[in-house]
Image (spheres, grey):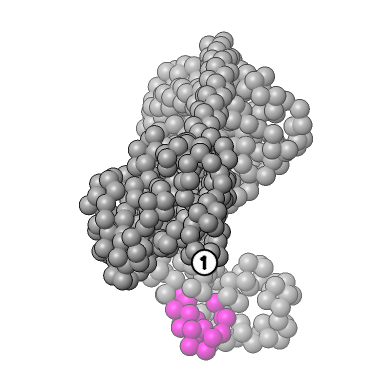
Amino acid sequence: MADRWARDLRRGRPVPESGLPWGRSARRPTASARGSRPRLPRPADPPDALLAVSRALFDAGDEDEILRLAMDHVPSVGPYRAEAGYLRVHGRLVPGPQAEPDHAPAVDRTVRELAGEDGPVDVPGRSWGRALALHGPGGLHGYLVVTSRSRPTHAQHFLLAMLVRLTAAALSVADARRRGQEDVLQLYQLRRERATLQQRLISLVVEAGYQRAVHEALAEGAASGGGERAIISALHALTGFPVLVEDPFGRLRSWTGPGRPDPYPDPNPARHEEMLQQAARRGGPVRIKDRLISVIRPHGEVLGTLALIDPRDDADDYTVFALEHAATSLALELSHVRRLAEVELRLHRELVDDLLAGTDEASAYARAEAFGHDLRRVQYVVVVRWRSQVSDEAFARTVGQSASAVGMPSLVTRRSDHVVLVTTGRPDDDALYEALARRTGTTDGTIGVSARCTTPDGIPGSYQEALRALEVRRRSRSRQGMTFFEDLGLYRILGPGNDYQELEGFVREWLGELIDYDGLHRAALVETLSRYFDCGGNYAETADSLTIHRSTLRYRLQRIREISGHDLTDVEDRLNLQVATRVWKIMLGGPG
C-alpha cells in the first residue's frame, strides 16, 4: 500500500491528506469508527510538505543548496532531526556546513565505513539513527544522517525514504545539469580553440608568403650587384617607409624614399653612442623617436645602422621582420665591402712602407697609379697618434676615411703607436684633427705634417719631418692638435729624440734664477721676458700684451737683469735668452 502511495505521489495523482496510507479511498475514518478516543489537533500534512520540498529541491541551484534544503525539511516528514549531511566531491565524502560539531567525528567515521550503504548511526540522546545513502544513476551522491528520539512508524519511515529519494533525484538532476553546463562550456572552448587555430593557420600561411616575398626581394637586390642601394630600395618597396643607412658614426650613407633632410643634420656623438648601446641591449630593432632602427653588427663590430622613418608608429610585425632581414643582408654586403677595403688597405700599407723606407721610383709610380694615387704631384707625409686609440687596422681605416672626408686622398699604413699617411696636397689647418675628433669622440690626439715633397725618394725624409713636428707638439704645453713642420721655426733643428735633458739644462743655465724667483714670489718674470722677445723688444706692444703699464714693464726688465745677471743689450745673451724662453714655453710646458 505504501509503495502504491509513493508511486501515485511520483506520478502526480491525488494522495490522502494524512501521512498514513488509508487504501484506495481518500476518506478518513469517521469518529464512530475511531471509537470514543478524543480527536487530536492535526499537524501539517507531511505529503503536502513533501510536495513543496520536492519543488524546492528540483529548483535549487546546486548540490550544496539541495542538501541544505533536505536537512532543513527532515523534521517536516516525521519526528526526525538531521544530524549531518555529506556530498561526494571528487570521490570523497565532504561534510555539509550544518553538521553537529559535538558528535561530528563519530558520525563521520561511521558514515565513511558504510561505503555507500545505509546503516545505523549512534548519536547520544537519540534512540534511533540512520545514515541514508543518496544514490542516483551516476552512483553515490552523498549521505543524510537522521536521528529520532523514538522509533519511527512505518508511515514516517516511508515519508523519510521518499524525502531521501527526492533528494537523491534532485542531486542527480543538479549533477546532470552541472555536467551539461561543463560539456557546453568545454564545447564552447573547443570551438574557440578551433577558431584560434584556424586563424593562426591562416596567419602562418600569410606570414610564410610574406617572408618568402621578403627573402626573394632582398636576395634579388643583393644578386643584382646594386649592393647597399639595391637592398634598401627593396626594403622601401616592401614596407612603404623611407629607408636610410648611417655609418658607425651617425653620418648618412644612403637614403631611399621621400622626406630626406637637406642638409642632413650632423650627428651628436654622445647621443649616437647611447642609441647604439640601447639597441645592443634590446638585441633587435629599437624605436627612437620617429625611427625604427636596426644596428648592422656582424661579428660584434658596428658597421652602421639601418632605419625606417615611421613617425606615426604604423610598423607591424611584418615590417619588423623585413627590417631585420634587410639588416642581415646589409651586414653581409657591408662585411664584403669591408673585407675588400681591408685588402686594399693592406696593399696600400705595403706601398707606403716601401715609400717610407725608400724604393724604386718607377715601381712606386706604377703601384700608386694602380690604386688611383698620383705620386707625381706634391706629397705630404702625415703622422697621427691618438692616445685613446690603438694603432690597429680599424684606427688606420678611420684615419684614412677621415682624410678622404676632408679632401686628402691618401695612402695609409700604420706603425706600433701611430698611423702614417702619404697624401696629395697640403692639408688644411686642423681639418683632419677635427674630423678625427668627431669620429673617435675624443680630442686627445696629435698630428704632425711634413714639408712638401716633390719626388718619391724624398718621402723618407718627409716622414722624419712629420715625426719631428708630432714630437714637438706632443712635448708642448698644448699637446693636442695639428702641427706643420714648416711652422716649427727654430725647432726644426731639434731632433725628435725622447731625451730632453740637454734642453732642460740649457733652460736652467739661462733662466734658472728667474724660474726660481717666479716660483718663490709668484711672479711672472720669465713670461714677461718671453713676451718681450715675442713682441720684438717693443715696449708698447709688450706692455699691452701683458696688460701692464710701461713703467711696470721697465721695472720687471730691470729686475730680470739684476736676478739673472744677463745683459739684454748683448747680442749673444739676448739670443740665448730668447731661445731659452722659446724652449721653456713650447717644449718644456711653460710655467708648469
Magenta residues span 510-526
In the rendered structure, the answer to whether residue 366 lies left or right of residue 143 reads: right
Task: Say which residue appears at 44% left-offset and 71% top-offset.
Answer: 507
Q: Quadrant of the N terminus?
A: top left
**Which secondary structure, mark 1?**
loop
Q: Residue at x 55, y 61 (%)?
A: 42
Quarter assignment of residue 311: top right
Is 66 or 55 nearer to us in this picture? 55
Question: How far across and how far down the image is residue 422, in percent?
Answer: 50, 33
Residue marked by disc 1:
38
Query: Is residue 86 visible in this depiction of the protein?
Result: yes
Quadrant position of residue 391: top left
Secondary structure predominantly adopted by residues drawn in magenta: helix
Residue furthest to the left: 113
Q: Amino acid at mark 1?
A: Pro
Magenta stretch: includes residue 517? yes
Q: Give 339 or 7, whichever is nearer the viewer.
A: 7
Check residue 582 for magenta coloring.
no
Give the residue drawn at x 49%, y 16%. 370
At 58% from the left edge and 71% from the top edge, which residue is drawn? Answer: 530
x and y percentages locating residue 267 in the rendered image: 64, 44
Q: Is residue 286 above or below residue 127?
A: above
